[in-house]
Image (cartoon, rainbow, N blue to C red):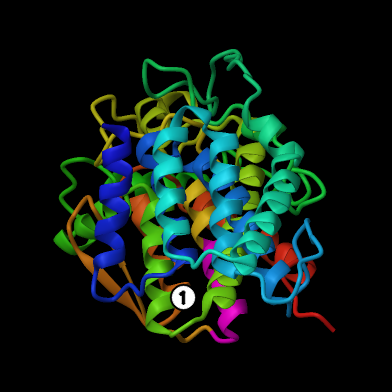
Amino acid sequence: MKRMVMLTVVASLLCAPEVRAGVVPEWSLIAQNSIVVVGRKFPGEAAVYMGIVHAAIYDAGVAVAGGYRPYRVSPVVPPGASLDAAVATAAHHVLVGLFPAQQGALDAAYSNSLAGIPDGQSKTDGVAAGEEVAAGILDLPTDEGLNTAVPYVQPPSGPGVFEPTAPAPPLGTRLPQVVPLALDAASQFRPDGPSLLGSEEYASDVEQVKALGRLDSAVRTEEQTRVSLFWTDHDIPQWNRSLVRLAAARGLGSIETARMLAMVHVAASDAMIACFDAKYHYLTWRPIQAIRRADTDGNSGTEADPTWRPLRNTPNHPEYPSAHACHTTATTVALEDFFGTRSVTFSIDSLVTGETRTYERFKDAAQEVNRARVWAGFHFRNSDQEGSTLGRKVARFVLDNFFQPLE
């Protein structure tokens, strides 16, 4: 059943009229579904897995086509090697290494990819290049951290302290220990912390989310509700579907598509690692806790409402900073860098609402996400702003140090 789900979803995406088939987008979508649909990874960890796979796709493509500095692995490849064979092999081998239980479905997808490449030395050399790249990427310490269990330890309860928002253990506890793909350390750009409980800024943020993020809000508009729900889709496949469509719409070739995807996913991966480092460093309570217990925060500008509920169930990890803001801003900054402009028309769809929204600038999507997380009742305004700042810093570091053209 899992194999059928993976292959059916990928096939349907590749057959969409705006998506041009090719090995790079094909394996990007296979990775997306292997990680999220079958692997069931939540956005924080899914972003890191996507970064690992797309680093392999990029290095395999660069090994054959040249033109850019490799991310990590640079095999010596004979002229004429098949880029498609290298990319498919690298992506397949890395995914099998990350998700050995999915090998049957991944092997079937790999066989389909290789069947479309003529047999011969070009194919053989491409496969060999992909194998070497995959071995090098799987040797990264990042994967090891993703397989390390880090139990959640609840600190003493009190004003401002996060407590789980679901019966299950909080998500993402291992991410602060994961070695980033590009940053020197997860804490490299750690922000300086949430607003002080007694501050006017904190009181203002509490009252804003209290009014706009309430399930039965009388002030949130119908459009704000639609936007909030639009962005409650799983943001990793939501963005990746958009990236694949964007590459096709802009007529990008294989190596440019691989580079764009790697820039985005590695930046987004490290933004998530940095974000969860900050989350579990500060362990800040969510609006649902802050509003219901506002009579304990020592701030005369807040008032408790024990009946308050957000628009949707609150994600089960600490509030500060906003993970969606970290991820989306890192994504949009990487796209601005790749295209050399902020003004590119692109669309994003949501499986939650069934809508497709179109944007004229990359940053418009990031700004909308920040507002939407308040309207959904998930975050304080300051946490979205700080998340965006963190995502921007991480992305700039990644883009300044990786995926650059050869001089």
User: Majority secondary structure of the magenta segment?
Assistant: helix
Please tell me which residue lies in front, 371 or 202.
Answer: 371
Please tell me which residue lies in front, 117 or 178.
Answer: 117
Query: For the point 75% across and 42% down, which residue is it?
Result: 140
Is residue 28 shown above or below 151?
Answer: below
Query: For the point 27% across and 41% down, which residue is it?
Result: 5
Q: Is residue 14 visible?
A: yes
Quadrant where the N terminus is found in the figure: top left
Is residue 392 shown above or below 303?
Answer: below
Please tell me which residue lies in front, 372 or 77.
Answer: 77
Quadrant where the C terminus is found in the figure: bottom right
Q: How many marks?
A: 1
Q: Which residue is mark 1?
A: 362
From the viewer's perspective, tell me whether residue 373 is left or right of residue 353: right
Position in image of residue 207 (x %, y %):
37, 46
Q: Is residue 23 magenta?
A: no
> How many other residues sit within 10 Å of disc 1, few (<14), some (14-19) or many (≥20)?
many
Is residue 133 shown above or below 65?
Answer: above
Q: Which corner quadrant of the image does residue 273 belong to? A: top right
Amino acid type for the residue under numbered disc 1? Phe
Q: Which corner quadrant of the image does residue 274 belong to? A: top right
From the viewer's perspective, tell me whether residue 84 is left or right of residue 22: right
Position in image of residue 186 (x %, y %):
73, 43
Position in image of residue 229 (x %, y %):
25, 51
Give the magenta range. 329-341
Mark 1, secondary structure of its residue: helix
Position in image of residue 73 (x %, y %):
78, 56
Q: Is residue 195 visible?
A: no
Query: For the point 56% across and 51% down, which residue is it?
Result: 91
From the viewer's perspective, tell me whether residue 196 is left or right of residue 112: right
Q: Residue furthest right?
A: 407
